[in-house]
């Protein structure tokens, strides 16, 4: 049986600072969004790539096997290996099976940054007055996918609606109560963790489709937060500027996504990951970068380790005004 990619990951060490380290995000999403960027972090050159497999799981797994041992870190895009709620971690079985194709290279899904970077982003925005969350109505499209963001938003005292049942399962049921959210997660996640990922999250060309739904809650919110594909999945058409004056808080975004938010009237776009050559990469990519910089194995890295590297990078949320 293939072993867990976490337990077989080799330590990266600090190594040769002149050799570019290569971090590749292998995504179940569309290959239309593929990108390769050369950059540097803390003086260390990196080659960062995103390679979509158009929802083809066999191709996804074959690409992981092809890259295994040849790159410094692999990020899992378009899927989660772990989801969290109430301090518990749930393993997505379908993703774990796919990820087992990588036996040597460390594999990350971005959950380390969802627990640190995204949590700190909310606190920074609130502390610096960029977004006063306590006075805002916030729609978080999926809490179990952005658990750090969910907990930080709750801390601000905002009027929070959690959309897991709507955007994850297609049910028109918003969650207003934090206790109810935790209780539902504890009851449902053990079952959901066994489902195929495409049942829960748009993969392949479905990431490019927009099926308007739940307009009432998009219009209700002052801040729409969470995964970019979940936000786009059911957003209203641009007519009437349904996002007029709103803030979008998300991570991965291409220039096309930015224009979609702009034409719907969104005022502010905040991305938690840095812009590299015109787009922000997902948390899985940046977690791969931070893991490489830490010099540790994935199972050895703590939230504080990630926070320490983020501090050295002087990491800050990217804030973009979308309207003149």
Image (cartoon, grey):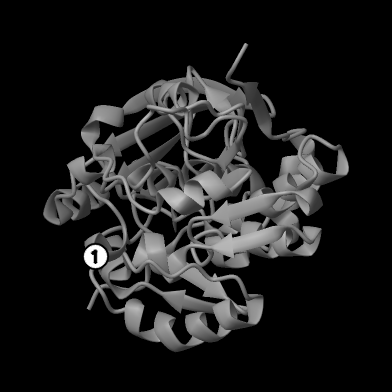
**What x and y, as percent, mark residue 23?**
44, 38
Q: Which residue is mark 1?
A: 199
Q: Nearest the camera: 211 or 16?
A: 211
**What x and y, as percent, mark residue 39?**
54, 21
Q: Nearest the camera: 134 or 130?
A: 134
Q: Residue furthest front?
A: 240
Drawn side of residue 127 relative to residue 84, left or right: right
Q: Nearest the camera: 42 or 76?
A: 76
Q: Is residue 30 above or below residue 123?
A: above
Mark 1, Cα crowd under 10 Å, few <14 / some 14-19 / many 20+, is: few
Q: How many marks?
A: 1
The residue shown at (68%, 65%) is: 151
For mark 1, give the secondary structure.
Answer: helix
**What x and y, as percent, mark residue 298?**
54, 61
Q: Residue furthest top?
A: 324
Residue 296 seen: no
Q: Nearest the camera: 181 or 308?
A: 181
Image quarter for residue 181?
bottom right
The residue shown at (79%, 34%) is: 130
């Amino acid at each position: 049986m293939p072993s867990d990619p976490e337990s077989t990951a080799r330590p990266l060490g600090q190594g040769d600072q002149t050799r570019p380290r290569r971090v590749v995000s292998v995504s179940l999403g569309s290959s239309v969004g593929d990108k390769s960027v050369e950059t540097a972090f803390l003086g260390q050159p990196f080659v960062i790539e995103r390679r979509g497999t158009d929802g083809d799981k066999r191709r996804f797994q074959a690409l992981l096997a092809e890259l295994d041992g040849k790159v410094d870190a692999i990020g899992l895009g378009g899927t989660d290996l772990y989801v969290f709620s109430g301090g518990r971690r749930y393993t997505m079985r379908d993703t774990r099976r796919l990820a087992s194709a990588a036996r040597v290279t460390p594999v990350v899904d971005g959950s380390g940054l969802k627990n640190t970077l995204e949590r700190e982003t909310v606190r920074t925005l609130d502390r610096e007055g960029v977004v006063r969350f306590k006075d805002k109505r916030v729609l978080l499209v999926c809490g179990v996918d952005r658990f750090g963001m969910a907990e930080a938003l709750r801390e601000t005292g905002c009027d929070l609606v959690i959309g897991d049942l709507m955007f994850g399962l297609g049910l028109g049921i918003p969650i207003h109560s934090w206790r109810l959210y935790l209780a539902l997660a504890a009851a449902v996640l053990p079952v959901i963790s066994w489902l195929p990922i495409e049942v829960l999250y748009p993969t392949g060309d479905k990431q490019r489709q927009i099926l308007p739904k739940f307009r009432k809650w998009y219009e209700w919110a002052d801040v729409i937060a969470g995964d970019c594909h979940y936000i786009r999945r059911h957003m209203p058409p641009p007519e009437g500027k349904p996002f007029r004056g709103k803030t979008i808080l998300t991570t991965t975004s291409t220039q096309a996504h930015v224009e979609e938010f702009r034409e719907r009237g969104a005022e502010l776009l905040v991305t938690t990951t840095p812009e590299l050559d015109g787009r922000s990469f997902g948390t899985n990519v940046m977690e791969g970068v931070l893991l490489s910089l830490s010099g540790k194995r994935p199972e050895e890295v703590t939230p504080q380790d990630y926070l320490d590297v983020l501090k050295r990078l002087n990491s800050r949320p990217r804030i973009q005004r979308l309207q003149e």
